[in-house]
Image (cartoon, rainbow, N blue to C red):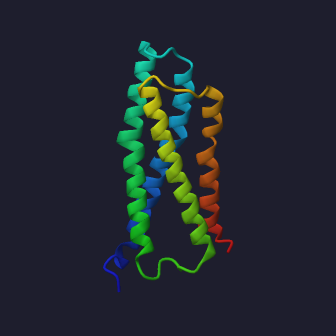
Amino acid sequence: MSVLEPYVLWIKALHVVAMVAWMSGLFYLPRLYVYHCQVAPGSAESERFKVMERRLLKQITTPAMIVTWLAGLAMAFTPGVISWTAGWWHAKLLLVLLMTGFHGACSRWRRDFLNDRNRRGEKFYRIANEVPTLLLLGIVVLVIVKPF
């Protein structure tokens, strides 16, 4: 019996709340980049966006990602919570890894804006803004429906 077993529902609740916060940040950050593209580098507006982007990423999105991962791993390693042979779980893990990669890309794009070296247009960020929605859709379907 795992020491975490009596707390699995609490851990699951924490996982869901952290995931919602993580997703909120990943939905909003590319939208900020769209708006940031519309202002001149070095302007007061650009500097304001830099502060907003930093705060969103460093104070909300990244801590929420870390808590999501830690709670998810805690559940994964609690006996009986998941079946290691279930296909849906492996597919979900792949999508979560892709979401984490997208998070890293958002972080890299923020550094480009921070250094006034953004080379992408607002259309790129409008398209990028859809990526977390598609990944989340796949993750939720896999967790709820467990199609395989």
Q: Horizontal placement of 43 versus 133: left or right? A: left
Residue sitting at x 37%, y 34%: 55
**Screen quadrant of the N terminus:** bottom left
Identify the residue shown where x is 64% and y is 42%. 130
Residue at position x 41%, y 75% in the image: 77
Q: Percent x, y for residue 116?
A: 45, 22
- Left or right of residue 30: residue 69: left
Of residues 136 and 119, the one nearer the viewer is 119
| Image position, residue 51 (x, y; %) | 38, 27
- State the residue lying farthest toward the left: 3
- The quadrant holding residue 3 is bottom left
- Residue 56 locus on image (x, y percent): 41, 37
Q: In which quarter of the image is the C terminus?
A: bottom right
How many numbered discs sit on the rendered protein?
A: 0
**Residue 4, image x, y percentages:** 34, 76
- When the figure is inspected, residue 67 is found, relative to residue 72, above or below; the finding is above
**Residue 50 vertical position relative to residue 106 in the rendered view, above or below:** above
Residue 85, located in which quarter of the rendered image? bottom right
Q: Residue furthest right?
A: 147
Q: Which of 126 and 115 is in front in this view?
A: 115
Q: In the picture shown, does residue 66 fall above or below 131?
A: below
Give the quarter of the image for residue 68: bottom left
| Residue in the image at 48% along x and 25% along y | 117
